[in-house]
Image (tube, rainbow, N blue to C red):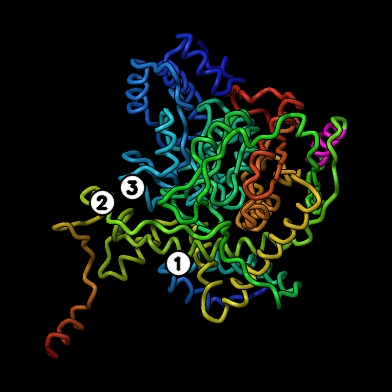
Amino acid sequence: MREVISLQELKRIAQVSKLELSEEELQGFFEDINNVVSRFEKLNDLDLQDISPTSHLSWSEPPFSSDEPRAGEGGEEVLKGAPQVANGYFVVPRVVDKEEKENEDRRV
Amino acid sequence: MKIEEFRDFSIGDYHRLFKDKEISPLELVNLFLERIKEGEDKIHAFLFVNEEKAKDEAQKKAENLPDELPPLWGLPVAIKDNICTRGIPTTCGSKMLENFTPPYDATVVERLKKAGAIILGKTNMDEFAMGSSTQTSAFGPTYNPFDRRRVPGGSSGGSAASVCSLEAPFALGSDTGGSVRQPAAFCGVVGLRPTYGRISRYGVVSFASSLDQVGLITRKVEDAITLLEVVSGKDDKDSTCAPYPPFGRSEIPAPEEIRKLKVGVPREYFPSGLEKVIKTKIQEVLEKLKEEEIEIVEVYLPHTSYALESYYIVAAAEASSNLARYDGVVYGLRVEGENLQDMYFKTRTLGFGREVKKRIILGTYALSSGYYDEYYLKGMKVRTLVRQDFEEAFGKCDLLITPTTPSLPFFPEKKGRDSYEMYLNDMFTVPSAMAGLPSLSLNCGYDEGLPVGLQIIGRPFEEGKLLGLALFLEKLLALPSPFPLFKEDNNE
């Protein structure tokens, strides 16, 4: 295995991806991901200087929908799948830390 | 009637029985439910069997036989568990969506129902369609009906195994890099991935949006044609769905026209690592086509060996972005945390399995500042080269014939932690997916009881020629449709 991504870098990427990895998992991913990424270097064989990238495929002009109001789907039914709901809203845990909040209050 | 009598049936045969009152839709549904009960502890193709609702729907239909039967009237269908079904769980084979029941139907499901089909159940799959073996499902693997020790392929392994074992007459799957064609090859059935944009993706859980396409898994080519007519065509709810009318069977050339088609064989699809028996079987078919005076030409797809790397960059990058939505807020799993960030971490850490986490990390890396040009941009540029290869090859022929997979169905033990070896199994299905081309896998024979898949690739929106050649080959090869007996494991 060639090390393309360092353990430190891997930790950072996992953090950005909002994933917690145990030390054991981290080690497993370190080997596995480096193994895959080192194969990507094969693409360096190709001269890609003047090649335009393909980000998506489209066979025709993207269609436009008519600008008319329509009833949306769901409403009550959409909320049924939510982990926590109150008064027609999604409920999430506290976003602002207590301390931050107090500081905020003092400033006001 | 007994289920084995349907072994070589296509939709028209069932409809004849309905019209002659030899069987009712309820009796038919009951036969498939019995078959599922007999087979499920052996192969585990289903994550959910829609028993009660399917019976109710079949009963309603039994009471009201129309004079003119809609194309799928009274026929049960299995649906891959990443396609939304109103009121029926849709888990994507993941703990993240274990308790998710969609409040709406995917466009394809809506169209199946309108055509008279009955939802029989939801089939097992690799978690979020990431895999080639149906081993990464959070709810346990599916086993190959021909040999339980081997994998059924993936990610639509449940759909392919259910159709192979006649637990369902046909099924929907999804194909991002081969997830319909590879399991179809491993289970000896027909797997069609139409042109990107032929079928609406509305209500199909996104993995890699520029590659995902709904696919059809059937026992006969004829049924793939009927299903494609029903589910294809413009959809206002999906802007990537091409604004064209549905496929029609009048697009299929007459048999005498099929003989005038030129078939290309790409040299790069016969590498040294290809299993010998697969090479032999495909060559036998090419010989038979020559005897039928179909012209075979050699073509070149020089960037084939770079397609897989490019695919894994692009697919992982798109997946990492698409799967960011699973955060425990709006639907799916929530694991409580001390604050919002903590909840995100706990939910995603417990909700996703290893392969999904790996691809999210890989994709996040490929998209992150400083690496974007090195990976994602390069991946997209190579995708252009892969497309250009096909364009050039199709200047010399109408259709391509290749093996679907480089190996016969493999053993799960053999492909372990190093996922790259498993990724290699997609080497023949990935390039046409990257170019958005219609491709179909057809069983072309058996080696010691295991099926060999042949792949046909066509130009964009030329499913007519593709299916025409598939029908021609199916007739020429005259292989019996599979009907594995659920015997105990073979001796080692």
The amino acid at mark 1 is: Ser
Q: Which mark is residue B100?
A: 3
Q: Which residues are magenta?
A: B277-290
Q: Secondary structure at mark 2?
A: loop
Question: Is B152 left or right of B468, judged from the image as shown?
Answer: left
Q: Secondary structure at mark 1?
A: loop
Image quadrant assignment for residue B193: top right
**Residue nearer the viewer, A46 or B147:** A46
Residue placed farthest to the bottom in the image?
A: A107
Which is the main secondary structure of the residues drawn in magenta? helix
Residue A13 on image: x %, y %: 48, 73
Question: Is B71 left or right of A6, judged from the image as shown?
Answer: left
The answer for how far apart the CA atoms under marks 3 and 1 are is 28 Å
Q: Which residue was labeled with disc 2?
A: A71
Q: Verify whether residue B278 appears in magenta.
A: yes
Q: Indicate whether A86 appears above or below B124.
A: below
Q: Who's the residue at 44% across and 69% down the image?
A: A17
Q: Which residue was labeled with disc 1?
A: A22
The answer for how far apart the CA atoms under marks 2 and 1 are is 47 Å
Residue B283 on image: x %, y %: 84, 38
Mark 2 residue crowding within 10 angstroms, few (<14) / some (14–19) / many (20+)? few
Question: Is B361 left or right of B466, judged from the image as shown?
Answer: left
* Tags 3 and 2 on a common chain: no
